[in-house]
Image (cartoon, grey):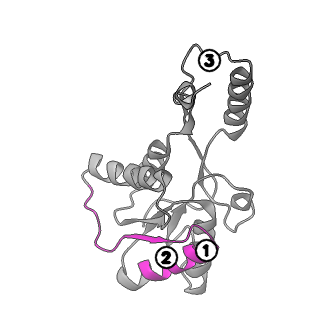
C-alpha cells in the first residue's frame, strides 16, 4: 500500500478555536490588555493557537498590545521567563492566554513572586487541561481537548487501516472546550 492511501487520515484538535474561546472569555470578563505566551517551537499547534488569540482580539476590535506576545520553551521554565518578559515590557496587562498549562504554571509562579494576585489582579488561562491545572493555587482555568475520544478514534482508524478498510477519507478535527476553574475573574 502506498503512502498516498494514508494521506487523508488525520486526527487533530481545533487549536485556533481553543485560544479564541480563551481570549473571548477574558474579553467578556472586561479585560482590555490581554497577552499571549506561546511556544518557541516551530510547530503548527503554536501557529494555530496564536492565530486564535489574534482572531478574538480582532473580532472584538481590541488592539494588539505592543510586546504582549512572547514565546519561550513550552514548559514551566519557559512560562516563567515569558511572564518575566511580559512584566518587564507591560505594566498594565490584566490577563494572559498561555500556550499550555505548564507555561501557565510557570507564569503564575512569577506573578506570585511579584505579589500579583491571581485572579483578583491578573487572570490567566492555560491550554491542554493537564493534571497540574487541578492542583495549582488557584486551580487553572484551561482549554480541554477530548483526548479519550481522539485516542479511541485514532485506534479505530489504525485498525481499519490494518484491515485495509480505507475506502473513505477519515480526517476529523475535534473541538476544544473551556474548563472554568479559579484563575479568571472580571477585570477591575
The answer to whether residue 184 is above or below residue 6 is below
**Image quadrant in which the N terminus is located:** top right
Which element carries disc 1, helix, strand or loop?
helix
The answer to whether residue 89 is above or below residue 146 is below
Q: CA distance from mark 3 to mark 2?
A: 45 Å
Residue at left 28%, top 72%?
66
Which element carries disc 2, helix, strand or loop?
helix
**Image quadrant in which the C terminus is located:** bottom left
Q: CA distance from mark 2 to mark 1?
A: 9 Å
Residue ranking furthest to the front:
1
Of labels 2 and 1, earlier in sequence is 2
Please provide the residue range marked out in magenta.
62-86
Q: Which one is in front, 122 or 12? A: 12
Residue at left 32%, top 53%?
57
User: Across the whole image, how many numbered discs are drawn on residues?
Assistant: 3
Q: Which one is in front, 166 or 83? A: 166
Instruction: From the image, tell me which residue sits under label 3.
Output: 166
Q: Is residue 85 left or right of residue 127?
A: left
Instruction: From the image, tell me which residue sits under label 2.
Output: 82
Q: CA distance from mark 3 to mark 1?
A: 44 Å
Of labels 3 and 1, earlier in sequence is 1
Within 10 angstroms of label 1, few (less than 14), some, or many (20 or more) residues? many
Q: Is residue 19 left or right of residue 109?
A: left
Within 10 angstroms of label 3, few (less than 14), some, or many (20 or more) residues? some
Q: Nearer the viewer, mark 3 or mark 2?
A: 3
Q: Which mark is residue 13?
A: none
Evaluate if marks 2 and 1 touch, with contact meaning CB atoms under 8 Å apart: yes
Instruction: From the image, tell me which residue sits under label 1.
Output: 106
Amino acid at each position: 500500500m502506498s503512502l498516498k492511501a494514508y494521506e487523508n487520515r488525520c486526527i487533530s484538535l481545533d487549536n485556533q478555536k481553543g485560544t479564541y474561546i480563551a481570549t473571548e472569555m477574558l474579553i467578556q470578563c472586561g479585560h482590555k490588555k490581554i497577552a499571549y505566551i506561546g511556544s518557541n517551537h516551530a510547530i503548527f499547534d503554536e501557529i494555530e493557537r496564536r492565530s486564535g488569540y489574534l482572531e478574538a482580539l480582532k473580532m472584538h476590535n481590541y488592539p494588539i498590545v505592543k510586546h504582549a506576545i512572547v514565546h519561550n520553551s513550552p514548559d514551566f521554565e519557559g512560562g516563567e521567563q515569558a511572564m518575566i518578559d511580559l512584566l518587564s515590557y507591560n505594566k498594565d496587562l490584566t490577563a494572559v492566554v498561555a500556550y499550555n498549562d505548564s507555561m501557565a504554571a510557570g507564569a503564575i509562579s512569577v506573578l506570585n513572586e511579584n505579589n500579583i494576585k491571581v485572579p483578583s489582579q491578573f487572570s490567566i488561562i492555560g491550554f491542554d487541561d493537564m493534571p497540574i491545572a487541578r492542583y495549582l493555587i488557584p486551580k487553572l482555568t484551561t482549554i480541554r481537548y477530548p483526548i479519550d475520544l481522539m485516542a479511541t478514534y485514532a485506534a479505530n482508524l489504525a485498525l481499519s487501516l490494518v484491515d485495509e478498510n480505507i475506502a473513505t477519507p477519515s480526517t476529523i478535527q475535534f473541538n476544544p472546550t473551556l474548563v472554568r476553574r479559579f484563575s479568571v475573574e472580571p477585570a477591575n
